[in-house]
Image: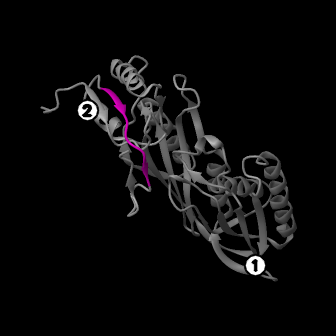
Amino acid sequence: MSMLQGHRMINLDSEDEGIFLTSCAGGARVNCRFPMKKQELTGVRYEVEVSGLLGGHSGGEIHKERGNSNCILGRLLWKLSEKMPVGLVSADGGLADNAIPRQTKAVVVVEEKDAESLEQQAAALAAELGDELATKDPDVKVTAKRLADTAETITCAAPEATKRVAAFLQATPNGVQAMSADMPGLVQTSLNLGILKADAEVLRAEYSVRSSVESEKDNLIAKLSALVELTGGDYVVTGDYPGWKYRVHSPLREKMVKLYAEMYGNEPKVEAIHAGLECGLLGSKISDLDCVSMGPDMKDIHTTEETLSIS
């Protein structure tokens, strides 16, 4: 039996004075793995690269709808696989599952007769993205660099395996999935393909999934897992933590807003964030918990330069 008997909680872990937080996202990591049959393919090697993107944190900037270099690489691989046999040699993109990737590289093998078409497809995608992301990511680049003058015999993922993982990357959900109806401008549910790694035998894709509504988070994971299984992969879910759903009626919040206005002469801002707070975990353990998160101005948190305002 829990020793906690109260049903009201004030969390003091927020970092901006005058802002009351009333909702946060829960989250989980979904790590996907796709075994691929390898083979020897005679052709020319190309390094294809997506770069120049702004990136950002998937909790704070996913709503800006910036380009995701891992997803864009998948778009290119699908375009190529639809037109020619492609063997995937390697891929490398992203640094963390919760960071929007800025740069992704892959090495592929195509037959000599398809080399010009590959270059044309890369240039065409670069032009498309230049138009699509003109405001959000104006410096996006897609390049294709030939790595050898003559044909070679290379160990790579078989073209049918390459097309299968390309289909997954083309079809995968990514970015904002739902906005909050209660808090204008707040992302309610999202996911981010943060890490993409591959060699000739296996491709790995790592996602950060977030939602302030537990059932939406679970359903999004279910959608992703269904797509993984349909395209011949497997997955594990780790680091699952609950969100903190916005309460339309919160006596604690109403009282705190009133007292703040009386003390300081102006009302506080009432906001929500698309990142995690302790309130979600405690709220999942204590039924009907009424909670508000607040705190003083803090800078450089989680560093040796952390400071806190006491004025």
Structure colour scheme:
one colour
In the rendered structure, the answer to whether residue 201 lies left or right of residue 253 reads right
Q: Measured along the vertical axis of the image, is residue 253 above or below residue 187?
A: above
Instruction: Tell me the mark number nearer the camera, choosing from 1 and 2.
Output: 2
Q: Specify the quadrant of the image occupied by residue 18.
A: top left
Label 2 crowd (10 A; few <14 / some 14-19 / many >=20): few
Q: Amino acid at mark 1?
A: Leu
Q: What residue sits right under mark 1 in the picture?
A: 147
Looking at the magenta stretch, what is its main secondary structure? strand
- Quadrant where the N terminus sits is top left
Q: What residue sits right under mark 2 in the picture?
A: 285
User: Which residues are drawn in magenta?
Assistant: 290-299
Q: CA distance from mark 1 to mark 2?
A: 56 Å
Q: Residue at x 62, y 59 (%)?
A: 161
Q: Residue at x 55, y 67 (%)?
A: 201
In the rendered structure, the answer to whether residue 236 lies left or right of residue 72 reads left
